[in-house]
Image (cartoon, grey):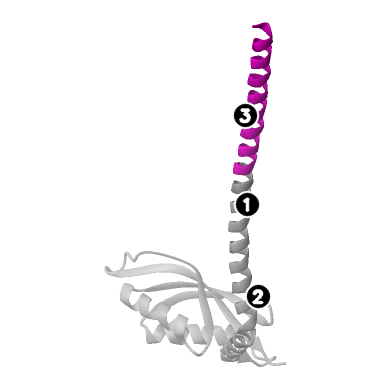
């Protein structure tokens, strides 16, 4: 019985070791499969990103043409033309057409934005909400210059019910003739 029990112990010990190796191998394969699936997902995402970048690179000519067309629409000033005067007149004309009263206007120094020039214009204005919306729309869509409203605040105008007063900062982009 002692020999049988030793043999049984050896068989049981061997089965336990084989079971532990099988468990370790199973865990390793499950981990390997998980890592493999993550790698496959990253590969698919990278393939999509590369395909998108390839399409974008292939469209470079189209984007360059669109950029050149947009640059040509930006107002070009002579070297001796003062941008302060030009921008003041332009903003004042747009405001007058849209029934906005500009009480003060202050421009900053001319700055450089890539191959363009830019200038900030601080405006204090008074007008009705509807006329303000029309003024802002015309500023954004005018062919006379390129404007971007950088900041704006407004309050009710105490002297005239239904009117607003406020300040806004416009960034104006233009080019200089070379």
Q: Residue furthest right?
A: 178
In the rendered view, would you say 86 is above or below 125? below
In the rendered structure, which disc, 1 or 2, sits on the residue that comes first in sequence?
A: 1
Q: Please determine whether, in this image, residue 142 is positioned above or below residue 25.
A: below
The residue shown at (62%, 91%) is 76
| Mark linked to residue 109 | 2
Q: Position of residue 10 (x, y in %)?
A: 68, 18
Q: Nearer the viewer, residue 48 or 99?
A: 48
Which structural element holds mark 3?
Answer: helix
Taking the spot 42% from the left edge, 73% from the top edge, the residue there is 125
Q: Which residues are magenta?
A: 1-30
Q: Quadrant of residue 137?
A: bottom left
Quarter of image, res 135: bottom left
Which residue does the numbered mark 1 point to in the structure image? 36
Residue 1 x/y as whole percent: 64, 6
Q: Is residue 138 in view? A: yes
Image height of 17 relative to 84, above or below? above
Q: Residue beneath label 3, please?
A: 19
- Seen as rendered, the residue at the extreme left is 161
Question: Circle 1 — which element?
Answer: helix
Camera-side mark, 3 or 1: 3
Looking at the rendering, in which quadrant would you find the C terminus? bottom right
């Amino acid at each position: 019985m002692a020999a049988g029990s030793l043999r049984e112990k050896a068989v049981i010990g061997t089965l336990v070791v084989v079971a532990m190796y099988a468990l370790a191998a199973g865990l390793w394969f499950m981990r390997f499969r998980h890592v493999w699936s993550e790698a496959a997902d990253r590969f698919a995402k990278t393939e999509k990103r590369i395909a998108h970048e390839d399409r974008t690179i292939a469209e470079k000519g189209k984007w360059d043409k669109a950029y050149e067309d947009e640059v040509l629409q930006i107002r070009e000033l002579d070297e001796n033309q003062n941008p302060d005067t030009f921008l003041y007149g332009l903003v004042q004309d747009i405001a007058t057409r849209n029934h906005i009263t500009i009480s003060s206007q202050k421009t900053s120094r001319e700055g450089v934005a890539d191959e363009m020039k830019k200038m900030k214009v601080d405006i204090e204005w008074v007008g009705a909400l509807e006329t303000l919306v029309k003024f802002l729309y015309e500023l954004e869509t005018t062919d006379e210059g390129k404007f971007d409203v950088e900041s704006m605040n407004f309050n009710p105008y105490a002297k005239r019910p239904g009117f607003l007063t406020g300040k806004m900062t416009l960034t104006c982009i233009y080019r200089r003739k070379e």
